[in-house]
């Protein structure tokens, strides 16, 4: 079996989908099953791509923005034919409109169908259009979670045989030393955008500080996204703005350092198709507090403390509850480490390999 994987997303700074694509191909090439893996659109000099006899890497420089979109529509299907792949895997909603080989599409979420304006009109229209093409033309759709599967089934008329669920993985006990930090902090990791619900987090954090008088800071690690100015305004209006830090985009190595030194990780999102940072935090032994929304309870299970994301009071109460009890934090660390073990990239790769075989066999 010869599988082509579109890895052009790696040309952009690595966020959730990029880390998924990279971790998946790294694990696929380690499977004992025989297979040939063709990585299409890899950026030149990218560190971390697997090197093996059964791996072919086709490099293309600078695939970002509209150049990546054009490449996916024109060059990607040509390359799939040139390398004689049996299956082409596109790791998100975007795929060539026309392809001569069967296509597997991963759909991470349908946030661009939300009634909330999480995306600009043009971005929302583009994502919806390509998702409809993926639903109509792809041989198999793969959702990250049962939550996303149910959303797909509710939005589109789909045969259950076309739709699979494959959970993402997480690196178990990732390498890296904690930062040396004098002051304790609560950590958030992700894009700084509206659907991450950061204004309510900022209000809840300030309320918790006023009520409990704790010394903790709040670190927001991630690149600015849509409506970032609203987040900045919420910080400026807060009476604890001096204790809130925005790092900007940080590398995965730096993120692991931040996880290891944090007292607590918080995910306040209104919408997530999976919520990979929840598992990353658990795998580093950090207690996790997150919103009772979308896929997050499915991923966090009984290892996290939950709150209503629309209530700053509940956010404050959850933070105070966990920060105020060392025994609770110890129990949450134990449960989190056990929970993270249920999600591995090796298992993710095995399940995708099964999908490829089913699609290749018709």
Image (tube, rainbow, N blue to C red):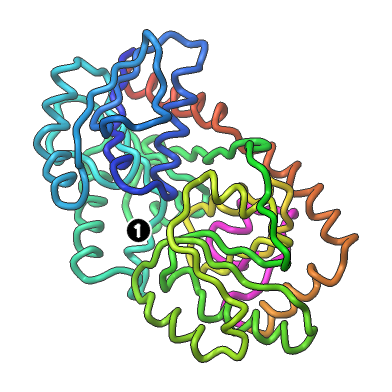
Rendered position, 164 above or below 258 = above
Towards the viewer: 267 or 108: 267
Magenta span has 341?
no
The quadrant in which residue 55 appears is: top left
The reply to whether residue 184 is visible in this rendering is yes
- In the image, residue 203 lies at what x, y percent? 59, 84
Magenta span has 298?
yes
Identified at 75% across, 77% down, the residue is 215
Residue 139 relative to residue 212: left or right:
left
Identified at 22% across, 27% down, the residue is 59
Rendered position, 222 above or below 29 = below
Residue neighbourhood size for the residue with mark 1, other residues' Cα within 10 Å, grouped as few (<14), some (14–19), many (≥20)? few
The quadrant in which residue 86 appears is: top left
Identified at 64% across, 82% down, the residue is 204
Read off the magenta span. 290-311
Towards the viewer: 355 or 330: 330
Q: Which residue is mark 1?
A: 155
- In the image, residue 254 lies at what x, y percent? 54, 49
Q: Quadrant of the C terminus?
A: top left
Q: Quadrant of the N terminus?
A: top left
The quadrant in which residue 120 appears is: bottom left
């Amino acid at each position: 079996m010869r599988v082509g994987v579109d890895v052009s997303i790696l040309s952009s700074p690595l966020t959730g989908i990029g880390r998924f694509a990279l971790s998946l191909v790294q694990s696929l090439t380690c499977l004992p099953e025989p297979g040939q893996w063709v990585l299409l659109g890899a950026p030149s000099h990218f560190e971390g791509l697997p090197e093996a006899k059964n791996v072919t890497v086709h490099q293309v420089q600078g695939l970002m923005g509209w150049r990546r979109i054009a490449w996916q529509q024109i060059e990607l299907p040509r390359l799939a034919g040139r390398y004689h792949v049996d299956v082409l895997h596109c790791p998100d909603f975007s795929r060539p409109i026309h392809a001569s080989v069967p296509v597997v599409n991963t759909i991470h979420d349908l946030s661009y169908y939300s009634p909330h304006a999480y995306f600009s009109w043009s971005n929302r229209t583009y994502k919806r259009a390509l998702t409809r093409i993926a639903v109509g033309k792809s041989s198999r759709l793969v959702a990250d979670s049962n939550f996303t599967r149910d959303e797909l089934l509710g939005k589109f008329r789909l045969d259950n045989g076309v739709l699979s669920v494959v959970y993402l993985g997480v690196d178990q006990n990732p390498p890296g030393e904690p930062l040396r930090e004098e002051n304790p902090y609560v950590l958030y990791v992700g894009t700084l955008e509206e659907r991450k619900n950061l204004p309510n987090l900022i209000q809840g954090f300030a309320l918790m500080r006023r009520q409990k008088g704790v010394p903790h800071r709040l670190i927001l690690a991630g690149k600015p996204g849509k409506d970032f100015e609203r987040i900045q305004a919420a910080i400026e209006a807060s009476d604890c703005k001096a204790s809130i830090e925005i790092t900007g985009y940080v590398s995965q190595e730096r993120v692991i350092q931040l996880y290891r030194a944090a007292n607590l990780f918080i995910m306040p999102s209104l919408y997530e198709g999976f919520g990979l940072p929840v598992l990353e935090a658990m795998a580093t032994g950090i207690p996790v507090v997150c919103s009772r929304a979308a896929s997050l309870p499915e991923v966090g299970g009984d290892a996290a403390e939950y709150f209503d994301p629309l209530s700053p009071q509940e956010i404050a109460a959850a933070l105070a509850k966990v920060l105020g009890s060392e025994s609770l934090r110890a129990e949450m660390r134990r449960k989190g480490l056990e929970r993270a073990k249920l999600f591995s990239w090796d298992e993710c790769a095995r399940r995708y390999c099964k999908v490829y075989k089913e699609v290749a066999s018709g």
